[in-house]
Amino acid sequence: MRGGSRLEWAIEFTFVRSADLILHSRLSFNYNSMYRYAANLAIEKYLF
């Protein structure tokens, strides 16, 4: 059972999404979409 790591993943995901929202509200450069792309890749790597 990996319940603990699933909880950690949920916390990490929430942190990534909130950081993404903060970045999106502060700056609208291409860097933001690159950050989102990298975050999505990391999430997929954790999931699959």
Image (cartoon, helix red, strand yellow):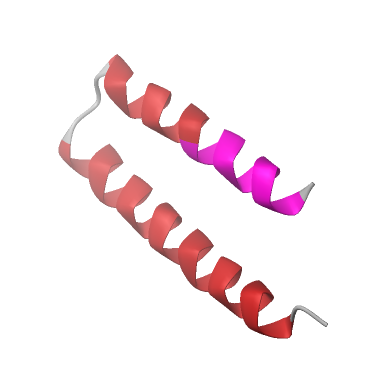
In percent of the image, x 18 and y 31: which residue is there? 27
Q: Position of residue 1 (x, y in %)?
A: 83, 82
Q: Is residue 14 above or below residue 3?
A: above
> Is the magenta region chiefly helix, strand or loop?
helix
Which residue is outermost to the front?
1
Q: Which residues are magenta?
A: 39-47
- Whether residue 40 is in magenta: the answer is yes
Left or right: residue 48 versus residue 9 is: right
Q: Position of residue 24 (x, y in %)?
A: 29, 39
Which residue is outermost to the left?
26
- Whether residue 20 is in magenta: the answer is no
Q: Nearer the viewer, residue 14 or 7?
A: 7
In percent of the image, x 67 and y 51: which residue is there? 46
Q: Nearer the viewer, residue 38 or 23?
A: 38
Left or right: residue 19 versus residue 40 is: left
Give the number of callouts: 0
Q: Nearer the viewer, residue 39 or 4?
A: 4
Q: Position of residue 47 (x, y in %)?
A: 74, 52
Toward which corner of the image does residue 34 lie, by quadrant?
Answer: top left
Q: Position of residue 2 (x, y in %)?
A: 76, 78
Q: Is residue 28 above or below residue 30?
A: below
In percent of the image, x 59 and y 34: which residue is there? 41
In percent of the image, x 42 and y 54: which residue is there? 16
Left or right: residue 20 versus residue 29 is: right
